[in-house]
Image (cartoon, helix red, strand yellow):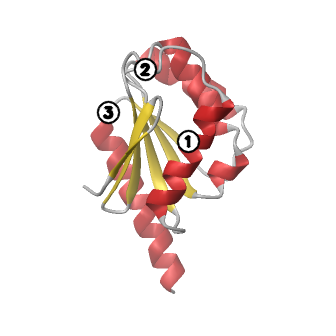
Amino acid sequence: MSEQILCRKAKFWFNEGVLFCEFIPHEADDHFSVHFLDDFLEAISTLSKDGHFPLVIDLRALKNKCALLAIELLSENPELNSFILSKSFVVSSCIMKLNVILFIMNQDSVIPNKVFTNLENAIKYSLETNCVFNTQKSI
């Protein structure tokens, strides 16, 4: 695992071609502001070093309402979409997964958004996305 970047509500790191974001319990229990988004974008930009990588966003530590607010903020941001290949949201329940799927279905995203209840599956998907992108890039 590479360096970690800690911001107000989450920690970020880069490992084996995948960017990770994990929300900190009790730090992310309130609203998400523009300041959080600025911190988020800066952390992703710093870790990616101008490359494009998949992003795994672990929301399991958040209450459902806060998780949906975070997803709304992150899924509608064009600047974030310019840094990453895909977003994999990891949630704590099947009901939350359904809520997130319904929400992101209405988004006109230029990058794929997937929802998982299992971190390992999210990582596997992200590694495959990175492999496909890098293979196409080198051809």
- Residue 63: mark in rendering: none
Q: Secondary structure at mark 3?
A: loop
* Mark 1 Cα-neighbour bin, 10 Å: few <14, some 14–19, many ≥20: some
Pointer 3: what residue? 118
Residue 72, quarter of picture: top right
Give how far across and how far down residue 114 sits, in percent. Answer: 51, 40
Give how far across and how far down residue 14 sits, in percent. Answer: 36, 55
| Outermost residue, left side | 1
| Amino acid identity at mark 2 | Glu
Relative to the observer, which residue lies in front, 65 or 7? Answer: 7
- Residue 39: mark in rendering: 1
Between tags 3 and 1, which lies in front? 1
* Mark 2 Cα-neighbour bin, 10 Å: few <14, some 14–19, many ≥20: few
The alpha-carbon separation of the residues under discs 3 and 1 comes to: 26 Å
Whether tag 3 and tag 1 are in contact, CB under 8 A, the answer is: no
| Amino acid identity at mark 1 | Asp
| Amino acid identity at mark 3 | Asn
Pointer 2: what residue? 27
Give how far across and how far down residue 118 sits, in percent. Answer: 32, 33
**Residue drawn at x 46%, y 29% as measured from the top left:** 9
The alpha-carbon separation of the residues under discs 3 and 2 comes to: 23 Å
